[in-house]
Structure formats: structure tokens, C-alpha cells
Amino acid sequence: MHKQSLILQQKAPKNINELDQAFKLIDQKLDAPSSQLLLMKTRYISIDPIMRVWISGAKTYLPALQQNDIIHAFTLSSPVDNQNDIYFGPAGLQTHFLYDKTNKKKQLIKVPRQMLQILQKCELQNSNLLTIILNGLPAYYGLVDFCKIQKGQRVVISAAAGATGLFCIQLAISMQCDVIGFTGDIEKIKFLQNQFPTLRIINYKLDDWDKQIENNSVDCYFDNVGEYMLEKMIEKMRKNGKIALCGSMGSSSNYNERQGLSNMNQIINKRLKLKGITFNQELNKIQAAFDYLFQQFQQKKLRIFQEEYNQLNDTPKALKRLFKGDNIGKIIINLDNQTKL
């Protein structure tokens, strides 16, 4: 039995167009499964901004990658002999793998059957579960649980046409907030205008983008970028405002050369509250989060925007698209009908 894997050939180059140099596709032999080891098939792979940090060799909540390591990625996978069971976790860029179901430090979580049934009721696909977990949960934790956004409040969202940004926009609009979204691409501006007529859109690539929001006027800022945009938005916050910190796309290309904020004093003077947001931070609240999101889907207040590729070796191409900001919504590698031993 064999599988295909994408391994780290070298740390990610700064030039996005040379990203292929970081990846190497290899065939690997798989040991035979046993009563302890499940033979798993990767069905869907999530393409995320943090992958640029991982392939730079930086340590995050996952171990730092070394040369020839299988590259980290979150996936949905199933036992080869039971496609009705679906597991979520950081199984990496590989078509198949052996999973030790007796390991006490399990990295994979079995998706409850009830959740899969709810997906069907909401007319969603199994692949959409990756987007709900990795992007919907942070949007909920940041806006609903932490910021506790309310009708009429001004909510600003960076990377508005990204996977998490689109969740945030829809949640804030459903709460009848005054919603402003940042993007830097003309096609994305047209897309957002068409999909969300009440959304106010600011092109952050314009020289005066920061002057289009009054100082001391923002109640909640959901930050997917960090660095210069976060620094500017601190000036725009009202007293006692809240900032949900969910991404650092502004520094993902030079992760080890990040710059600090120069206006920390404003955080103190305005008594701002800042909180780091991840998809897996509030395990005691995860059921409430899923219930809220699925209710939004059932009420047609939430939609998923998703792009798909169909080969493991499409990953570098998909990442280039993501890092250049050419994508709208989530990017998924769909291997459901492609992977064979």
C-alpha cells in the first residue's frame, strides 16, 4: 500500500511565485493496518493563511516543521472501510495515513453523526464542515461571545472577502450592526457589493483608507491582518471598545521579522479589550457556538463561499492564490473521489 504526501523541501521563500520550491510530492509505503491502527483516507484539506507560517519553519500550536516533514494541514478524513465516520484534525498533506485510535494524545476528533445530519438539514456539504470549524467558530467567538455585538454598533472587519471575514460580515449584518469591511481588490469589492448591499466597503490600498473611518467611532474590530492595520484601527476605537485578534496576514510572509505596535498607550487610555481568537479556544462553549451557527444557516442568514481544487499536488497553486489575495472565501482541496491506494 502506498500514499502520496507533500513534504517540506525547504523553508518558504519570500517570493510567492517561488512557493513551489518549498514542496515536494513523494510516494510513501504504508504499513498494514491492525486492530490498533486505522487506515484513514483524507477527504478534504483546508487551505489556510497560517500554512505560510508553518512552511516558514516557525513553531505555533503545532510543532515547527523540519525538512522532509509532512506539511501541516487541517483535514476531514475517514477510515477506508467506513466512509460514514468522519474525523477532523491536523492530519497533514497526505492522501492516506495510519491512525492509532488508542493514543491518549489523540489529534483527531470524530465528528458526531448528529452534526452530519444537521449539515444535511441545512443543505450543506461535508466539506463545508472544515469552513464552519476553522472560520465560523472564530467569527462566533470573536463577535458574538467576546465583542457581544449589538444592533446599531459599528463593527469593522479586515480581510472581509476571506473565509473568516465573510462569516463575520454575515453575523454582524444579521445583528443589524453598522458593518464596514476592508479589502484591497476591485473584483472583491464588486463581489461584496453584490452579495451584501448594506455593507460599507473600504479599499485599504488607497492612500486615505484610514481617513474614511472617524476616530473614536468603532465598537468592535475583528482583525485578520495585524501590524499596520491593527495600529491604525486602535485610533478608530471608542473607549471600552473590543478588538478580536484572529490573524496576522500582514506579517505571515516575514513571520520572524514582525513589528510591534507603536500606540500601546491608546489601548490603555481607551481601556480597550483585546483578545486572541482561535477556533479551538473555548471548548466549553463549542456546542453553543455550533447551535448558533447552524440556526443562522437554517434561517438563511449564513452562506458558505468556497473554492475547490481536486488534487493533492494542487496545494502550492491554491496557496499562491490565497497568499496573493486572489481567492474569495474558503479554499478546499477535495480528494473525496481522487485518492486511491
Image: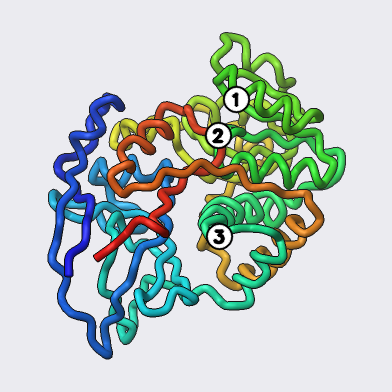
- State which quadrant residue 166 falls in: top right
Q: Which residue is mark 3?
A: 129
Which amino acid type is shown beneath numbered disc 1?
Lys
Estimate the x, y position of residue 337 in percent, counting from the top left.
Answer: 40, 58
Q: Residue furthest top?
A: 207
Secondary element at image label 3: helix
Binning the other alpha carbons within 10 Å of mark 3 as few (below 14), some (14 to 19) or many (20 upward) gives some
Which amino acid type is shown beneath numbered disc 2?
Ile
- The answer to whether the residue labelled 1 contacts the one labelled 2, judged by CB atoms less than 8 Å apart, is yes
Q: Residue at x 34, y 35 (%)?
A: 317
- Between residue 190 and residue 1, name the one nearer to us: 1
- State which quadrant residue 157 falls in: top right
Estimate the x, y position of residue 237 in percent, counting from the top left.
Answer: 69, 32
What distance separates the C-alpha of mark 1 from that of mark 3? 24 Å
Q: Which residue is mark 1?
A: 188
Binning the other alpha carbons within 10 Å of mark 1 as few (below 14), some (14 to 19) or many (20 upward) gives many
- Between residue 209 and residue 78, name the one nearer to us: 78
Estimate the x, y position of residue 173 in percent, counting from the top left.
Answer: 79, 41
- Between residue 171 and residue 145, name the one nearer to us: 171
Which amino acid type is shown beneath numbered disc 3?
Leu
Estimate the x, y position of residue 115 in percent, counting from the top left.
Answer: 62, 72
Binning the other alpha carbons within 10 Å of mark 2 as few (below 14), some (14 to 19) or many (20 upward) gives many
- State which quadrant residue 15 falls in: top left
- The answer to whether the residue labelled 1 contacts the one labelled 3, judged by CB atoms less than 8 Å apart, is no
Q: Answer with left or right where residue 123 lies relative to residue 127.
A: right
Q: Which residue is mark 2?
A: 328
- Between residue 120 and residue 324, name the one nearer to us: 120
